[in-house]
Image: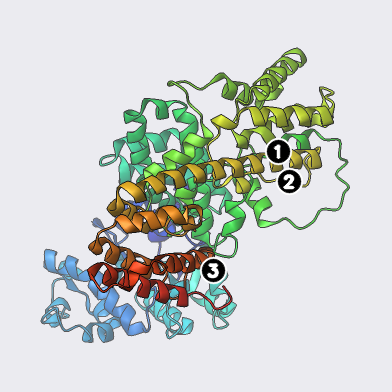
Amino acid sequence: MNENLIEIIKQYLKIETNYAVIMNGSYGIGKTYFFKNSLSPAITEISIPRDEQKKYIPIHISLFGINSVEEVQTQIFFALYPILKNKGLKLAAGIGKSIIRGIAQINRLGDIDKYIADIDVNANEWINYDEIVLCFDDLDRKSDNLNIKDILGFINTLVENHGAKILIIANEKTLQNDEDYTSELREKVIGVSIQFNPDIDSVYDLIIKDRYSSASKIYFNFLEENKAPIIDIIKKNENNLRNLIFFLEHFKVIFYPLVNLFETDVDFKVSKQEKLKIVLSFTLAISIEYKVGNLNSTNFETIQRLNEFSLHGLDMLLSKKTGTEKKDKKSYSDIFKEKYYSKDNYFYLDSIFMYIIGQSAFEIENLKRELNKLFVVENGNIPDTQKTLNSLGYFNCLELDDKNYRKTTNKMLDYVDQGKYQLVEYPTAFHFATRFNNLLGFNIDKLKIRFKKGIDKGKSNYKFDNHLHFRLVLDENTEFKDDLSEIMKYCINANKNVERANVKKNILELEQLFENDFENFLITTRDTHGSFRFSPFWLDISLHKVYKVINQLSNIQLTELAFYFQDRYRINIYEKLYPEKDFLIDLKNKINSPQKRKVKNLRNASLDFLIKHLDESINNFPSQQ
């Protein structure tokens, strides 16, 4: 890896010099990693010119946040201190004097004079500058308090007066923003400038071997097998290795629970490789975009609503456009898809997205639910409906001849007639039937009627999809856009019908719970993660039934119900609960109506307690409600 760069440094170390060498490159591309893991070991094998028995000692000093030259001198001594202490060596007088101000600041190392050589000490027991290669890293990230003239002046003293070998690691584009970093100053101190171009393939191999080959063997093997797509994305993002490491560590959290699920769930294991590919691609894209700052709170929704299937991708490639049309400035969604999904369909995975941006911990069950929606499995196999749809997908359809293309499309439409697809799939099927300028010559109006009948027929098979309106996104360039939009709206309405049916079923179950198991009713409707805590379900339960149950509750349970209402309708009531104000008023009047409420007893005292909390709850609603 970068053998040429290593050779340049070797030649620099073998000759007399009075200048420093700078290794220039962008942030995060592995300059420091290269020095520590490749260049530094090579330096330790090089003999110093005056004594073949002695080898160079590489010293790495980070200038990140350094405020003064004295702090630099202190860092040099700290770096040398373990060597001096372990080998019983001393600093030669010259090197000691050059960092004496920094040494004077050190109090916790004991008597430091014993580490500085007198002129009478045997030279073999000295460490001098001609034995050290000083690497000053992060020059471009020093503190504003440290003037660039001062630090380069110090470096110039070392190279001119002490013959020191010095390597500077920096991003010169940033340094050039400093008005004190003049060409004259640079030329005085720096003799050779080397552009660092990382060998990403080799660095990738080193990183995953160092981090995962021993402790995470399965993960290591997966990263080796999927090296090509990962490296491709890293190269598209300026070879930034910090972004790579950010991805690797976060993907590891997702990878192991996912692999474990494949081993324990037979149905989920179906289409294992396709699922892994989707998860890998999405995690890689979101990790990189978030780490570099392209993805932030201003455009989160762009990624969340990016259409899962590109209805126009292949059509655009095969269209007869001349390319002379005026091109608008690319949106972030266009850039994102071009960079990460130019050849593959995009699938949004909320469980991974929220984890990467730090909004929630990763939960494998959430990812499982999302993948199960994308990959329908029946009895351990992918149903023929899915296989048919997949064979017509991009770019699989191009592998069919005209006869089989028509045959497969008609087979898909037979499944549409039977209502065999999920609601999210019907728009895809409609597009597959009409694309390429209605290649198969269908009557579009009749085809829409056919699809609607099929959607109606399959209503008993549909599961409510809370994200359907986000998943069905139209691109302006899609063929038969208005007709496809009509099918999408029909699917969205069918989804709402499923939701209403679910609500009715849930309300019926809730009524039965209220009548038969009051304590569990309170637990269920108080659950902040459940569907009832923030939905106005009381409006769907008969007031007569509620009053009947209240009459059957014990006095203690009436008190519990009072506290329940108090908790549900605190100040700043959730807006969706506003309609329940009328229910509370009707319930209060219903309880207060009987004559027997005038009798003074424990029962009425308990009911009075309930009425008091109903009044307080009613008063917490906004006045216009």
In percent of the image, x 48 and y 69: which residue is there?
Answer: 585
In percent of the image, x 45 and y 51: which residue is there?
Answer: 244
Q: CA distance from mark 2 to mark 1?
A: 7 Å
Which amino acid, mark 2? Asp
- Say which quadrant the C terminus sits in: bottom right
Mark positioned earlier in the residue sequence (3 or 2): 3
Residue 620 badge: none
Which amino acid, mark 3? Glu
Which amino acid, mark 1? Leu
Question: Which quadrant of the structure image shows residue 151?
Answer: bottom left
Secondary element at tag 3: helix
In percent of the image, x 82 and y 53: which residue is there?
Answer: 327
- Say which quadrant the N terminus sits in: top left
Other residues around mark 3 within 10 Å, as few (<14) / some (14–19) / many (≥20): some
Q: CA distance from mark 1 to mark 3?
A: 45 Å
Secondary element at tag 1: loop
Q: CA distance from mark 3 to mark 2?
A: 43 Å
Q: Which residue is mark 1?
A: 311
State whether residue 33 appears in this view. Answer: no
> Where residue 414 appears, x then y in whole percent?
68, 19
Q: Which residue is mark 2?
A: 475
Secondary element at tag 2: loop
Question: Between residues 130 and 374, which one lies in front from this camera angle?
Answer: 374
Q: Which residue is mark 3?
A: 172
Number of on-image labels? 3
> Where residue 390 appears, x then y in whole percent?
61, 26
- Residue 616 vertical placement versus 47 (above, below): below
Mark positioned earlier in the residue sequence (1 or 3): 3
The answer to whether marks 1 and 3 mark residues whose Cβ atoms lie closer than 8 Å is: no
Q: Does 58 sit left or right of 93 as displayed?
A: right
